[in-house]
Amino acid sequence: MAWYAYCITEQQAFQGESRARRPFVINEIHGIGERQVMGYPSGELAVIVSEYKRSNDLDQKAILEHLKVVAECFRSATSSNTTVLPFRFGTIFDTDDALRRAVRANRKAFLKGVAHLRGKAEMHLKLLVKDGSLREALSEIVLPATVGGDYLTKLREKASRQRERQTKARAISVQVHKLFNPLEEEVSCKKVDSGGMLIDIAHLVDRKQIEKYQARYNSAARQFKDCELSVSGPWPPYHFLPGKLRTVTN
């Protein structure tokens, strides 16, 4: 039997102090295509799965259903002071044995990830920078079609503007880090069609500090006058999984 995998967590998120030895049904959660969701036990861990027959139903709707399962598992894990380690969308194990082998092969990484992320959540902060001083840095340099002196000049100018954008983004992210003081962070930056620069920041925070984090958002909105800010969360810790977890496939 094939299994579609959503995430992995500790059994206590759904079983309390007892420990199952066989797959157990999680009635309150529905998976992709309204499939029944189950916990596939492995020691103190449980892989959250649905039975699966390979088809063409892994579409955009399925992505949202996958994320919903992970989010609902995260809420259950939160109440029992544990966490979830999300799998990539489309992770399928063709047999029971393939699933068991994957858990055994990654067991140390799973346990380390659960221990590291227990009691923590991800907050997501977006800053749209509209600073007029960035207008030139954000304008796109079009490279000539032919190689030559003009091409090299434009190439250097393009690299210079990219460095200027990165410098501005780093300066802002440092200010944000000092203000929010997260445990860990992941930062990305890109130019947007509206002529601004979008800085996307994921913060790992202690769940007990979420209210304080949200309060600091109001202070940030006043401090960053040249930015439009938005905050969301708490989310499962998508950006803070140990690297080995991201390689788990069918």
Image: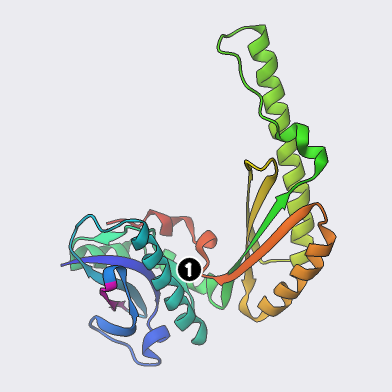
In the displayed orientation, state which residue is furthest to the front.
Answer: 194
Q: Which residue appears at 37% of the width and 57% of the height?
A: 60
> Left or right: 31 with respect to 81?
left
Q: Secondary structure at mark 1?
A: helix
Dominant SS of magenta comes to strand
Identify whether 41 is placed above or below 61: below
Tell me which corner region of the image, top left, top right, bottom left or bottom right, holds residue 110: bottom left
- Identity of the residue furthest to the left in this view: 1
Most foreground residue, 187 or 43: 187
Position in image of residue 193 (x %, y %): 62, 41
Residue 28 shown left or right of residue 156 in the figure? left
Q: Which residue carries the number 1 mark?
A: 112
Q: Can you give x and y, in whole percent of width and height, for residue 228 in the image?
A: 73, 56
The residue range painted magenta reads 34-42
Q: Position of residue 74 (x, y in %)?
A: 47, 76
Please rate how many residues cluster around mark 1, counting C-alpha atoms within 10 Å: few if below 14, some from 14 to 19, many from 20. Answer: some
Q: Amino acid at mark 1?
A: Lys
Q: Is residue 91 left or right of residue 149?
A: left
